[in-house]
Amino acid sequence: VTLKAQSFPAAEIPDSLKTNANVVIRLEEMVFEIKSVGHAVTKKRAVYTILNEKGNKYATYLAFYDKFKSINYVSGFLYDAFGKELKHFKKKDMADFPAQDGVSLVNDGRLKEESFYFHEYPYTVEFDEEDEIDGFMTIGNWFPQPSIEESVENSKYSIISPEDYLIRYKMLNSVILPDIAERNNRKTYIWEVKGLQAFEEMPFSAPMIRYAPFLMIGATEIEEEGYKGNMSTWNDFGKFYGSLQKGRDVLPEEIKQKVHQLTDAISNPEKKVAILYEFLQKNTHYVSVQLGIGGWQTFDAAYVAHNKYGDCKALSNFMVALLKEAGIKAHYVIIHGGEQDGDFVKDFTYDPFNHVICCVPMDKDTIWLECTSPYLPPGYLSDFTSNRYGLQVEDNGGELIHTPAYLLPDNTQIRYILAELDNDGNLRMESKTNYKAACQDNINKFINYQSKDQQLLSLKSKFDLPTYDVNEFEYREDYSKRLPVIQESLHLSVANYAQVTGRRIFINPNILSRLSGKLMEDKNRKWSLEFKDEYIHVDSIQISIPTGYETESRPEDLFFQSKFGKYETHIKIDADKIIYYRKFTQFSGRFPGNEYGNVVKFYNQIYDSDHAKIVLVRKS
């Protein structure tokens, strides 16, 4: 095999691009060429210099294909620090396997994969791929620096289209403008960026999409499997999406009869919704099936009725069909599920969505339904889809709507602890905690998706305590109201909780709610700060102490607040009992980077209070 000429020696990387970086993107060239409506060719060339073991993941290349996307060619090259080729692969050398996403029962996508295993740093990898796309509904965005660990030497994105095809674009966090050229009835757009430095990881930082250049591309005319549409406006988006689902809400006769059996005697529409939602939850379960244009088009209601499963689209479509049979109008809402990477851009039509929920307008309120969950109560979405924009699909198009936010008074964790300390410093305690709204979301997953043995194992490592045993635990769910509550009961035995030395006992009255670490000062902080969650945590604790002790020293009661939150503690020691109260209120919000010093002061003051100890001394 003839070796390629030396390429991309690491010595040519400027020192500024090595700072804070695990990998340097030496070159990235992407081309999206629209041959005609629904048909495109994409090309990508990427060259990465990997500086340390944290960057090794960039030495693995994955190429996806399915019935709409075929791979014309793929190649990869490995170079040493001097740019000398050590190894290469082609398409035929790559492993090929189903594209399992961890949630889909079946899909028709496949992956090709190849990795370079090399551990003499720095080293460089180069990958080239060309694909043919038969049917597209989106055009890829450009995010040249998606991770703080990457620096960028050079990145370029090109779109080539017929002259009369409208390309919509919006650049965020940058003033980069495209070079536009027209030739032979074709139009070319080129965006390019050079010399982007990596960032240092910092606490409370917003995602990279708020800082690094991000180019949004919006399709206009689209076509896939004979379905034609336009994505120029949100209404057009909803109209096209709705056309894919048309006629797929027909229920089998026996399900129609069941709907009437359950609801005909009920006059209250909200109760009808609750009854049918419970029917959905008890008689179906979530399974992702992605075949054909399965990422966009639902399996019909009869499919769900027969198989008793479906993905988010299919279950939401089934729920809409059940409600329709009961005479209640409901809508499909396509939305982003999970943590959001950035702010929703309302004035530019694009596709940030990956999930579907159900919306039921009522006279005075709206009932939201998460149709993939067998546990959530009607009307509650959880932090998976709350407080964000979605596209409601209506009969004649689509409309942006906003899901409910769960605000500070809603999200509470209220804990009561009764504890007893013996003469050797061992502690026995009973803890009862009510978790409400967003504060119960993780607990809900914990109790409904883990076995009892798994729960016990997790609880044994959950708390920042000396050696302890979980003697008993129990969880009870209260979904009688719109905001769910989970009640937790724990019985713990903690060995050597308090330090006993001679005549003195040193004890921390804050048993379970201590901050885990201090923040480091950073006077050069530039990135803005973001606090996504807002909640109230309250601890009320009573600790019985051995007789014959009196207080030698104790922390002062505290109250302080800032724009980031509030904190207060009260301590009373009376008749062999320590009574401790702690209330922490976390505000959400965004703040400039120069506020970081105040953040450090606020949280480190909490840390010091959380770890302060009472000193008891035996009476003479």
Image (tube, helix red, strand yellow):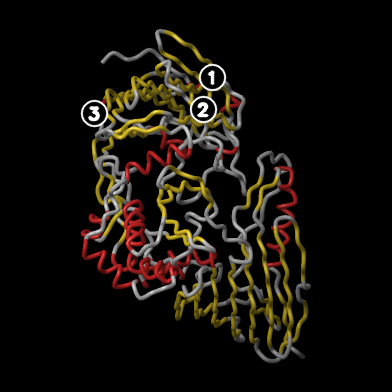
> Which sits earlier in the primary sequence, circle 1 or circle 3?
3
SS for tag 2?
strand
**Is the residue marked by circle 1 packed among few (<14), some (14-19), or many (20+) residues within 10 Å?**
some
From the image, state whether disc 3 or disc 2 is nearer to you.
2
C-alpha separation, residue under disc 3 versus residue under disc 2: 37 Å
Residue sitting at x 47%, y 55%: 384
SS for tag 3?
helix
x, y percent for residue 478: 47, 75
x, y percent for residue 75: 31, 23
Asked if residue 468 is positioned above or below residue 384 in the image, the reply reads below
Query: Residue 439 versus residue 599: which sits nearer the camera?
Result: 439
The amino acid type found where label 1 is placed reads: Pro
Residue sitting at x 45%, y 59%: 360
**Residue to which mark 2 is pinned:** 169
C-alpha separation, residue under disc 1 versus residue under disc 2: 10 Å
- Evaluate whether residue 87 shows in this view: no
Can you say which quadrant of the picture contains the N terminus? top left
C-alpha separation, residue under disc 1 versus residue under disc 3: 37 Å
Residue sitting at x 64%, y 78%: 540
Is residue 2 left or right of 512 when viewed as pictured?
left
Is residue 551 left or right of 489 when viewed as pictured?
right
> Which sits earlier in the primary sequence, circle 3 or circle 2?
3
- Evaluate whether residue 23 shows in this view: yes
Residue 178's label in the rendered image is 1
**Is the residue marked by circle 3 packed among few (<14), some (14-19), or many (20+) residues within 10 Å?**
few
Tag 1–tag 2 contact (CB < 8 Å): yes
Residue sitting at x 24%, y 48%: 106
**Residue to which mark 3 is pinned:** 93
Asked if residue 500 is positioned above or below residue 118 in the image, the reply reads below
From the image, state whether disc 1 or disc 2 is nearer to you.
2
